[in-house]
Image (spheres, rainbow, N blue to C red):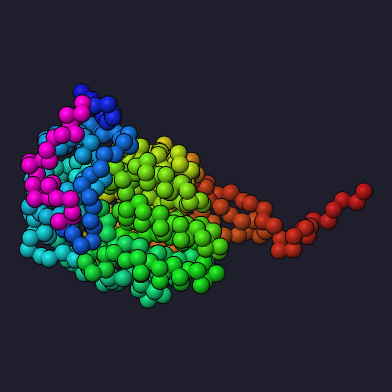
Amino acid sequence: MKKANQAYVVNEAESPSEEAEPPSSALLEDSNNSGLSLLFPELIQFPLPKPDKTFHKIGIRSLQFLRKYFPLVSKTEWNNWEWQLRNSITSWQTLQQLLQLDDEEVRAMTVQSANLPLRITPYYASLLDPLNSMHPLRRSVVPVTAEHLISPGEAADPLGEDTHSRVPGLVHRYPDRVLFLVTGFCSSYCRYCTRSRLVGDQNKRHLNREQWDRALTYIELNPSVRDVLLSGGDPLTLPDDSLEYLLSRLSKIPHVEVVRIGTKIPVVLPQRITHTLINVLKRFRPLWMSIHFTHPDEITPESAQACERLADAGIPLGSQTVLLKDINDSVPTMKKLMHELLKIRVRPYYLYQCDPILGSSHFRTPVQKGLEIIEGLRGHTSGYAVPHYVIDAPQGGGKIPLLPDYYQGRQNHDVLLRNYQGNIYRYPDQPDEVGKATEPLPSS
């Protein structure tokens, strides 16, 4: 029996007859023969897959899924990221061919209209448990009726991004950095998405070149901006030439010191991390990347290879994980995720309290749960494996870090500290006037 984390390596020297295989007719027949995205043809237009010489791995689970549901599709096609996008699951009729949907899932997609579209790449669908609706990855991408229940305090734009938008697609909330929403499209939609108001609106999904230029001009005219975060949607769904254009323009602005990319692509569409993309990205430094990992099950041979390829190109990688009820809200799950991330050279960065978007109550945990997780990590594993637990404050207050009560107050001149075992220690605090002695020095 082969282990689930083993990988099948696609060899470029495989039989050339695979290249001549016709598209699959077993699933998604209406989209396999099209060179365009049938869901948003005016937004995402790709040519038919070009031969990609990037060396890709295929995990055993994905390989089994490929053979079962796409028996006529070659491994070369499967590993083409444009093929993955064109054949993404976007309807419950297709989804029910892959998963045994329960009543909650069916009702969410048929009886009630969802604010956020359904979209799951075939690769990510291969990681879902077809029988268990409570499987963590499945809960994160398959709608349930709880999405339609609005609780007090929830809002379409809980972080007040729209009120801090100076020009379309640009959010200037912090003094020295901006958020540049270059697209509203994602290859897979997380059901707890902070920006579901954008990806759920077809007219807001993509900015065009003119809108990008307006945002870039704003950055050029504001010398206080030293840090630009490209986000969306997912910037890595853009074609290579579009990314090159954005990064090239930003690299020519003297006061922009750092560019970051926020993405989930290595997790849901690792086939996108091609040698061609890497060659574009590594030309522009310093470039940092924050990757949205949710659960240890997302770390597969494919996602590990994608991250290692980015790291080998000299791009520092960090993870941004959202704390989600019944998905990753336990110390063992979070510890395993953080350990696995370090093994693939991704530094745990943020653990986010789930934003109060509309219909998110079934995802949100009490804040105390996040503090318990941090306490279960700090001291019990290496510091590199402990992310910052933060709440992105509503109405544009920014990220606020939270910590367990390690600081226990003062006694006389000592600071009282509680360690990870619950023991109290004294630290002799420095007086306000540095160098002022609290005891007379002995005479010589």
- Give the x, y percent position of residue 209: 35, 65
Give the extent of the magenta segment. Answer: 15-38
The residue drawn where x is 56% and y is 62% is 254
The residue drawn where x is 32% and y is 40% is 303
* Magenta-colored stretch includes residue 35: yes
212 with respect to 3 (left or right):
right
Where 163 sits versus 84, above or below?
A: below
* Magenta-colored stretch includes residue 402: no
422 with respect to 436 (left or right):
left
57 with respect to 98 (left or right):
right
- Give the x, y percent position of residue 85: 22, 50
Q: Nearer the viewer, residue 360 or 56?
A: 56
The residue drawn where x is 26% and y is 34% is 58
Give the image quarter of residue 98. Answer: top left
Where 255 sits versus 306, above or below?
A: below
418 with respect to 57 (left or right):
right
Q: Nearer the viewer, residue 134 or 309?
A: 309
Q: Main secondary structure of the magenta part?
A: loop
- Give the x, y percent position of residue 339: 40, 39
Q: Is residue 137 visible?
A: no
- Give the x, y percent position of residue 320: 39, 52
Q: Give the quarter of the figure containing the N terminus.
A: top left
Among all residues in the image, which is located at the extreme right?
A: 444
The residue drawn where x is 61% and y is 56% is 415
